[in-house]
Image (cartoon, rainbow, N blue to C red):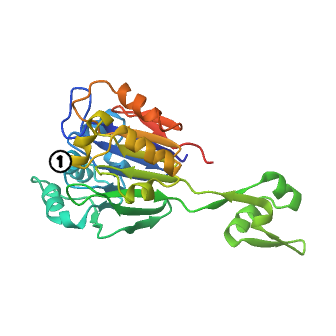
Amino acid sequence: MSVRELVVLGTASQVPTRTRNHNGYLLRWDGEGFLFDPGDGSQRQLAFAGLAASDVTRLCLTHFHGDHCLGVPGVVQRLSLDRVRHPVYAHYPDSGREYFARLRYASVYHEAADLREEPVTADGAVATGAFGTLSARRLDHGVESYGYRIVEPDGRRMLPDRLAEYGVTGPRIRQLQADGRIVLDGRTVTVEEVSEHRPGQRFAFVMDTRLCDAVPALLDGADLAVVESTFLDADADLAAAYGHLTAAQAARAAADAGVRTLVLTHFSQRYDDPTAFATEAARYFDGTLVVAADLDRVPVPPRR
């Protein structure tokens, strides 16, 4: 059975707290597992969430500040320890090759996993597959940082009543989906006649950044978007100085981009009350709003 959900491994920013682990997010997308920004302790958080290293198929780092990458050594070594059979692809800013090498080989271990590095060098498509297209856009932070976006191709939804009307049954349905048309009793039936347009789903991951052109581009029409909200608007000057968003800025950007479900995360340790983020964001965003907590599971909303 296909599963599409976000598993939140941690929600803290630079400093973890008693209730918040460092960043970490696993997006389960059918047969893929996109692990975004695993901070310190992510390997253990995977265990708490009932997940395994074998669930990871792609490792995506936005940048090389510690709260977004210090979990890489444990996760990478666990891939080998567990003898994960499938290749795992690692995407990260190309300028951080040296840092990734240090993280990958942070200590002695027997490397058995097939970890394939595919650094991000510019805006655009990073990878394609059955999941759709993974792309990256350069953000505005103190170091080179990229946000990520997954777009599933549009498809067709077969309509049972139209299939019955045209007499298309059994294996002929699959043939019609594959070929786009079939000949049945001397008549050509096209897939458009027995189906309707099905928009592909979209996911966005926006971490440490000021507002910039990449933010709306990444968020555009996202069914589910994970957006950092390190600060509240009362500390907007700190957000601007350190290259971050406030909850209000994240909410406004998500609303303008037509996001359906917004997940706020990456909270500064200065705030003890997560409801303050919900209150601030709700002034601008009227979709489904989630103020993330460690080990939350957030489903990708049903198709439009």
45 vs 101, left or right, is right
- Does 121 sit above or below residue 254? below
- Which residue is rendered at x = 78% and y = 72% of the image? 182
Residue at the spot of label 1: 66
Q: In which quarter of the image is residue 264?
A: top left
- Does 130 sit above or below residue 241? below
- Which residue is rendered at x = 38% and y = 51% of the image? 205
53 vs 193, left or right, is left
- Which residue is rendered at x = 45% and y = 53% of the image? 219
Q: Quadrant of residue 198?
A: bottom right
Q: What residue type is labelled 1?
A: Gly
Q: Position of residue 57 (x, y in %)?
A: 37, 55
Q: Position of residue 73 (x, y in %)?
A: 18, 50
97 vs 90, left or right, is left
Q: Where is residue 183 in the image (x, y as percent from the top left)?
A: 83, 74
Tally of numbered tags: 1
Of 244 and 93, nearer the camera is 244
Q: Residues within 10 Å of mark 1 (few under 14, many from 20)?
A: some
- Which residue is rendered at x = 38% and y = 59% of the image? 214
Q: Position of residue 44 (x, y in %)?
A: 25, 37
Of 271 and 265, nearer the camera is 271
Of 59 and 21, nearer the camera is 21
Of 25 and 110, nearer the camera is 25
Task: Name the element at disc 1.
Answer: helix
